Amino acid sequence: MSVKTLTIDGVLVSARADETVLQVGRHHGIDIPTLCQLDGVHSVGACRLCLVEVAGSAKLQAACISPVSEGMVIQTDTPRLREYRRTIVELLFSERNHICAVCVANRNCELQDLAVRFGMDHVRFDYLSPQVEVDASHERFGIDHNRCILCTRCVRVCDELEGVHTWDLSGRGVHVRVITDLNQPWGESETCTSCGKCFHACPTGAIFQQGSTIAEIDRDRSRLQFIVTAREKKQWLV
Amino acid sequence: MELDDLEKIGDRERGSWKPCRIHCCQATGCLLTGGDVVFRRLQEAVGAPGVADGVQVVGVGCLGLCGRGPLVAVRPQDMLYERVTPDNAASIVEAIDGGQAAAAQCDTSQPFFAGQVKIACEYCGRIDPERIEASIEAGGYRALFRTLHELSPDETVAEIARSGLRGRGGAGYPTGLKWATVSKMPPGQKYVVCNADEGDPGAFMDRSIMEGDPHRVLEGMAIAGYAVGANQGYIYVRAEYPLATDRLRKAIQQASRLGLLGTGIFSSPFNFRIDIRVGAGAFVCGEETALLASIEGRRGYPRPRPPYPAEKGLWDCPTLINNVETFANVAPIITRGGAWFASIGTEKSKGTKTFSLTGDIVNAGLIEVPMGTSLRYIVDEMGGGVPGGGQVKAVQTGGPSGGCIPAEHLETTVDYESLQALGSIMGSGGMIVMDQNANMVDVARFFMGFCKEESCGECVPCRVGTVQMHRLLCRVLERQATADDLALLESLCRTVADTSLCGLGQSAPNPTLSTLRYFRHEYEALLRTGQRDDPQRSLPIVQLVTSRTKP
């Protein structure tokens, strides 16, 4: 296995020849943003957030699928790339109904993280506000298409790691949906092994575990009573 | 099958000809205007008692002037009748021995016909596309024979390279270079694929070639197979072209039966099989990597290149993909030599190009002109200008990936570089003429609507960006947009063009950008003054996301 040297953001780095620009960047502490990429399954280069500028190439290259080559000079964080990334995240927020405040993944969401990282303080585009479904027919999991960004991680982990291929896609354009089996309710899927890999892969709150939605939270009212008792009776009773 | 056998088939075919042949166009355009009924009436008239035995009716491919179909040509008198109706069809037969037919005669010396140089469409409209004998009579499969017996694969590639032929699908990649790349890949399974997924609105060049001379395409593919070392070819044709699919299927059957496809072609060790794969209505499958995925039976999603299909194509094998028209140019190049082909056209764009001339134009139809012909000649002379003496406002080339060329640039010649310099592209050959009444913002909106519908949804900028650009264009048309909206539209155009995964998204902003470049005043005239105050868009998403704090 040969070794290549290349320059990322002005830093000369070495890389194994089979590495991608994204991997090399990460090894050297350069955090190129991604959404669809997931270690362990093949990369599709679909979210376009990891685009980087490669000297000598007019086109931007997706770092997750670009193999390194000798003498490459790469810029991962230029004003132009920052503008594009922010726009892409805005487009994602405009596409479906991402309401962080009521999302199971609030504060634990890769899309939300990126919005914060790129300083996306508002969306310049119309919200498309589509009417999409929530499929809660599965015993252990559910999918809320309002929060799906079509990264296809679930499709890939199901196919490549679990070897089942319960998940796939239907439709095209903004009408694409991830589907289970032949677009049957998830709970009726005959192939799903309930392994939960799709849940662990999902970057947003689209695929969630049953019992973690706001409605399903067990509320512990005795905690409120504890404070009331403390205030009124000056007694710290547990 | 040997060369002698080919000649015998050709001689027998010629021997069966009657002195007078009536060519009735049986391509989709004329069939839609009643060409099938006209064909039957002509046959009845020829079979009627009292008509001399020396007349026969032949169904042929596109005769060119599609806008005035059904078309009927009489050979050898070289008469052309336009807008033939079932009622006046018989009068054409009656007028053969002199006299005036009731059907309107069309002047075949007008520039529409005289300005053409036919290479890809050489036999289109001259032969019966459903009979291989007719193709062989005209000269079909001689180039394949010559290739297999006189040329090595490398010499074949060199001949194509010498011709300077460039991909006719739109991008204009040098065909010889592509062939050389595939042929230089290590031996093993390789494929040849013909891209017949012509989906641009207003484009019908490839359809006309497939419907008019399917054997020319098969022959080109077989020659390519020999040159690059492939034994299997696929034609990926869109399902919206049932007639072309049917004729290709017949042609493959007939060629296989004669041993012109299959194993041991022309008693050589060369094997080549061609199968048809029919699309399912997705424009994106004209993009080569999506097309390959679709042939493999997978979802028609494009994938990033490199690796290019020449290296890793169908089932990861080296694959040569060319467009229908590119393959249709191969046989004449082999027959007459690359140098001959290179003598036609301009310095960088050789040969001829077919265009489907449509829109606000007197002579709508299929034309084939040498590269370097000026747009003005095509539109004003060949096309006869705008009906009713109107003014040409713009010419749209390249479909949803192309742009609008304003009237002041009509002196531009058609070649890859000149059209690109104007912000349009050659594309596959759609050419839509627009008169002074055209609303250029609406034109941009139309093409964006098309891209929005056809976006596969894989990458974010194209999937959502096309929808948002379409919305902004609608907003301009509804006089609801402000200068801020226009700036946002332009910025989004740049983002989508630079960040989309495949050619569909990368070129989707082109019609908008080119109309903004030449007709910006039309956009500005529709703008509303003041600030944006759309209540929906001022939803405070800010507070929804900034509650997150980084650990």
Image: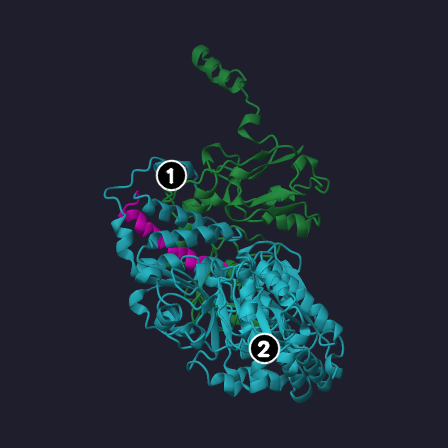
Chain colours: A green, B cyan
Local SS, label 2: helix
- Label 2 sits on residue: B179
Question: How many dots with numbers?
Answer: 2
Q: Which mark is residue B200?
A: none
- Label 1 sits on residue: B542
The answer to whether residue B164 is above or below residue A207 is below
Looking at the rendered image, the quarter that the N terminus of chain A falls into is bottom right
Residue A191 locus on image (x, y percent): 72, 43
Chain bearing tag 1 is B
Which amino acid type corresponds to the residue marked 1 in the rendered image? Val
Q: Are marks 1 and 2 on the same chain?
A: yes
Q: Which of the two discs, 1 and 2, labels the residue nearer the N terminus?
A: 2
Looking at the rendered image, the quarter that the C terminus of chain A falls into is top right
**Residue name at image x 47 percent, y 54 percent:** A49
Q: CA distance from mark 1 to mark 2?
A: 54 Å
Magenta part, dominant SS: helix
Image quarter of residue B420 = bottom left
